[in-house]
Image (cartoon, rainbow, N blue to C red):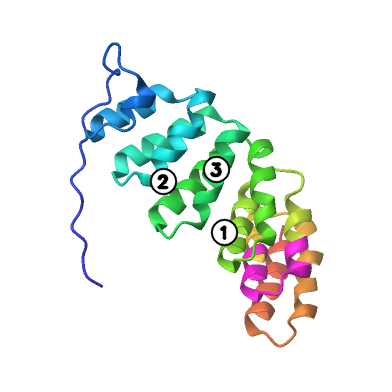
Amino acid sequence: MALVKARKIDRAKPGPVAEGGDPLALLEDANPACRRRAAHALGERPDAVPALSARLAREEDPSVRESLLTALVRTGTAAAAAALVPHLGSEDVGLRNGVIESLQQMPAAVVMPEVAPLLTAADSDLRIFAAQLVGKLPHPDRLALLAGVIDRDPHVNVCLSAVEALMDGGDPAALPVVERLGGRFPDDPFVAFSVDAARRLFSGA
């Protein structure tokens, strides 16, 4: 794989937005440092969510992107979570991973209603990402939602992602759910391995 030359990042400490400057307008400034300061200034401002989300979709500078994600996390509203969720389908791996990490830091009560519908999305990759994310959220519906994936999803890799998420959660109540997958895919060696691993894990829990 060819090595990619690292992008030079302006690591100057973010300072206050210039006096009289509108942070919403400065999100479109040509200077990355200025966009970064604007994003910092807009954290916890619910009215800024649409602008932060729009800039995030176009932002290429890693440090600015991180500041945009942080601002949305600090806002912590359902609208902020809804603004992040569409990026789970991004082809940009860095953006997608940043969004997953950001959603994990937000209140599960506002994230789960936005992520749960993706468990039945048409794209199996998106269902995998959703299962992984649901597994990280401390929400009372987590087990039931992942059980639904294991019992009904037609794609074995999506089901295995749900199994992995349940195992990471460490709840022994998940074992009967995982064991049901063996009945759905009795000839799949990966399923058999995962079910056996879950039995070993939860028997020692």
The disc labelled 2 sits on which kind of residue? Ala
User: Which residue sits at x=25%, y=35%?
Assistant: 32
Q: Which residue lies furthest to the bottom in this view?
A: 187
Confirm whether the magenta stretch covers residue 159. Answer: yes
The disc labelled 3 sits on which kind of residue? Leu
Give the residues drawn in magenta, as a range: 148-162
Q: Which residue carries the number 3 mark? A: 103
Q: Pinpoint residue 46: horizontal percent, then vertical percent.
A: 54, 25
Which mark lies nearer to you, 1 or 2? 2
Q: Which residue carries the number 1 mark? A: 129
Q: Is mark 2 on a helix, strand or loop?
A: helix
Q: Can residue 168 be seen in this view?
A: yes
- Of the image marks 3 and 2, the number of the one nearer the N terminus: 2
Label 2 neighbour load within 10 Å: few <14, some 14-19, many 20+: some
Report the Cα–Cα distance between label 1 and label 3.
12 Å
User: Which residue sits at x=30%, y=31%?
Assistant: 35
- Of the image marks 1 and 2, the number of the one nearer the N terminus: 2
Confirm whether the magenta stretch covers residue 163. Answer: no
Q: Which residue carries the number 2 mark? A: 57
